[in-house]
Amino acid sequence: MTQAGLRREPRVPLLTCLIFCVLSLATSGIQSLTVCARSAPQNASLNSLPLANGVAQFDDPYSDFRNARYSNAGLLNERDETKLGLQLHREVTKKFSLTDAGLDRTERIGQRCAKASLRPSLLYKFHVIQSREINGFSLPGGHVYVTTALLRLANENELASVLAHEVGHIVARHSLKSLKQSQEYDEIAKQLGELTGVAGDVARDLGVALGQIVGAGFLTVHSRDEEREADFLGVRTMPRAGFDPQGMVTMFQKLQRIEEQDSSLLGTLFSDHPDAQERIDNTRYEIARMRRR
């Protein structure tokens, strides 16, 4: 054998070794992807689960709410809920300055959302609060509030998204469920049952208790899951009410920009809520899902 042949001979096992290494790495990568896919949470939010190949796996962010059924069972009956709402509204008027500015617009859009909701028979009343805060909230019995600052910020579809969201809280009885967990619930329920008007000792005593509840924001601050549920109910209500659900996305985008610039302008409607980008992604997911059907 020549010297040249001796020099070339070791290259064959070297090439074989390199091929073996590449195949081993590829196999390892495939196994890694398989483990990631199998270990992904079954109920992850729309915020993606990134995979090594750059493709994101998504799951249904609203799966917990799709088969929900709503009623007053186990809570105040609807008659007492209506009484509660009236008394709570009286306390709200003591704490906030209500205005007629923008009320016609709010009422018109709000009633369309209410009638298209999963609780259309309740008597809804919409109110506007004079405030520099961008805020909105709802109370049992069909009372919904938005601020003048929010009205200036939102176009028709965006305002509909906020009102449909707040109607969603009423549909899901979120505030009633919070009240049921309070220490004062039994006494309040008893007083509501005895209440026949807006005057008298019972109404006065009830007003004191409810004034404290309104002041503490106990019925207007919701858990993150409750906010997600109200988003879900709201975005599904919008097309039935004749509004573009994309308005919920653009509303969240506006709020996201304001939060980055001056978060003090955002009221309790957006405090301790799910992350704005999560809500944008979840809403887009639901809009795409509705369009496929």
Image (cartoon, grey):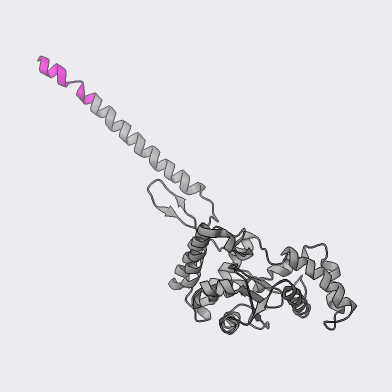
Indicate yes or no whether the magenta region holds residue 228.
no
Q: Position of residue 112 (x, y in %)?
A: 57, 83
Q: Which residue does the image show at 51% across and 73% down from the upper left?
A: 158
Closer-to-camera residue (32/207):
207
Left or right for 101, reference 13: right
Q: Which residues are magenta?
A: 1-13
Q: Quadrant of the N terminus?
A: top left
Q: Position of residue 25 (x, y in %)?
A: 35, 35
Closer-to-camera residue (29/9):
29
Left or right for 38, reference 68: left
Closer-to-camera residue (233/105):
105
Q: Please, is residue 26 above or below residue 142 in the view?
A: above
Q: Which residue does the image show at 58% across and 85% down from the upper left?
A: 104
Q: Position of residue 117 (x, y in %)?
A: 59, 78
Left or right for 66, reference 205: left
Query: How many dots with numbers?
Result: 0
Residue 1 visible to the viewer: no
Outermost residue, right side = 201
